[in-house]
Image (cartoon, grey):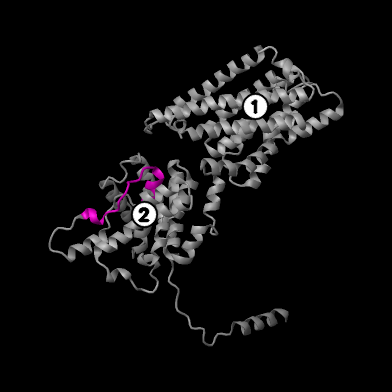
Amino acid sequence: MDNKGSKKLLPWGKKDVIGVTAVYVVNLFVLAGLFIAAVFFNGRRGGQPFAEYFSSLSSFFSFLVVLVLLIGVMALFFLFESRDFLRSPANSEMLFLIMEAGLIICYVCGNYINPYVRPLAFVAVTTLFLVNSRTAVFMNFVFCILTFLFDAFSGSTTGMNGYSVVFFLVMGAASGIIAVYVLADVYSRGKLLALSFPVSLPVLICIALPMIEFGSEGDRLITLLSGFFSGPLSIASFLILLPFFESVFKKVTCFKYAELTDHKAKYIRKLIEQAPGTFNHAIVVSNIAEACATAIGEDALLARTCAYYHDIGKLRRPEFFKENQADGENPHDDLTPELSANIIKSHTQDGYSLAKKARLPEEIARVCLEHHGTLPIWYFYAKAKKFTDGEVPILQYCYPGPKPQSKISAIIMIADGCEAAARSLKDRSREKVNEAVKKIVSDRMQLGQFDECELTIKEINIIINTVVNRLTGVYHKRIEYPTVSLEGIDVKKEEADLQSEEQE
């Protein structure tokens, strides 16, 4: 999502501007509606009556002005920091929906349970896993200010002193930031819940301050317990609502990646059953791709998942691919080189179609399509040249593309080619593997396969070293075991004799 550095910005059209503007305007009215609803329910719970509150519109008008300013700042942040993210109306709608869900949950918990149990870190945690940490920190501040505005203008904190209302702003900001940096690399739901208690620490610290009034000692104990569970409630709310956001906005989190790479997942199970050679190849490629992505600072989980699925197009005709031809029969022997090439190169489009049909994330579907770029299928091109005296148009034997559009696609292209080459080597020493990997990468660079994904020379060198290290680890040399005849050897008798000697 980061648009800084060398990353090219996507062009904006009139439709994009209208769509994003509409989302911001609509959600301005939604937030105003939630505020009016809060005033109404506060009046029914003993606060200022609804009619009396709106007898003078000065408070509501002040709230609207500050709300417009806050939403304007939000738009400016994304305009200058993440224009590509802002360009999609769905992204903006998702963030607004997260905030609105957070406001509703906080209102219900604060007014019907205890104000200090409110899941103030909910927005930060949800944005962290659906977008990134920088956006999560910013949205956390926006949400805390918005919550403070609701408290201050709607009368939600009836019965609490002014210090308490101000400290809620501090509690929310601190809890959210702690959540972002404590939970950033946690990919287990159990660990999330276990690490959620430090998120409650700012709430407990603020509760301990002498400026906050509680009434009786019993009220203080209830408040402390409520504050203690503020963090866990934030995580619980996130885990409950996450599938909704993933499904509606087609976002992929680490939890979704874990589900997709599980061996019980639909297409992984099909690969195991119908194309075991392709599956084993995908496992090795996934380990290489994950290491390469980590080395250059890309999303390692995404790289791993893409590697698992990059060849699912081979499920259409698994027997036409060498790794699945266990019995030695090759159906290409009975086909023309041109037809064979068409079958081989169709697996990229077939993979994209299967991925879209299965509603896999677009990032994975694109890798299925891009991981061979516009590379020639040299084997069948050379075979065709043997059968003709004239020129053979090489474009007939090239993959249709497109070339890799992302660094992840480029990593999969390199890992895919290098794994296949290393598997075919008779001498798998480090020197030979290094030579093969460098040649594969050099060939792809000469054919311009990395021209559209902004992979730097420095990153390519890092990837080469990482691939070599991984492949030499996978295909390391093994000692030759001597052939030993078991005839005349009775292990059980020798064990019995040894036990008898020990007893004596």
Q: Position of residue 434 (x, y in %)?
A: 34, 54
Label 1 crowding class (10 Å Cα cut-off): few <14, some 14-19, many 20+?
some
Q: Which mark is residue 129?
A: none
Q: Position of residue 500 (x, y in %)?
A: 69, 82
Which one is closest to the eye, mark 1 or mark 2? 1
Residue identifier under label 1: 34
From the viewer's side, name the closer residue of 418 and 458. Answer: 418
Q: What residue lies at 39% left-to-right and 31% top-to-bottom?
A: 5
CA separation in Å, label 1 and label 2: 48 Å
Q: Which quarter of the rendered picture does the C terminus lie within?
A: bottom right
Residue 169 forms part of the magenta stretch: no
Query: Going by the image, does 226 lie left or right of 279?
Result: right
Kindly state the secondary structure of the residue where label 1 is placed.
helix
From the viewer's side, name the closer residue of 141 and 437. Answer: 141
| Range drawn in magenta | 394-414
Residue 399 forms part of the magenta stretch: yes
Give the answer, above or below, for where 155 lies relative to 96: above
Q: What residue lies at 41% left-to-right and 45% top-to-bottom?
A: 408
Give the mark nearer the N terminus: 1 vs 2: 1
How many badges with numbers are in the image?
2
Query: Going by the image, does 341 lie left or right of 165?
Result: left
Give the answer, above or below, for where 294 lies relative to 216: below
Kindly state the secondary structure of the residue where label 2 is placed.
helix
Three-letter residue code for mark 2: Thr
Q: Position of residue 44 (x, y in %)?
A: 77, 25
Label 2 crowding class (10 Å Cα cut-off): few <14, some 14-19, many 20+?
many
Figure quadrant of residue 335: bottom left
Q: Position of residue 123 (x, y in %)?
A: 61, 33
Q: What residue lies at 64% left-to-right and 43% top-to-bottom?
A: 240
Residue identifier under label 2: 348
Three-letter residue code for mark 1: Leu
Q: What residue lies at 40% left-to-right and 71% top-to-bottom?
A: 326
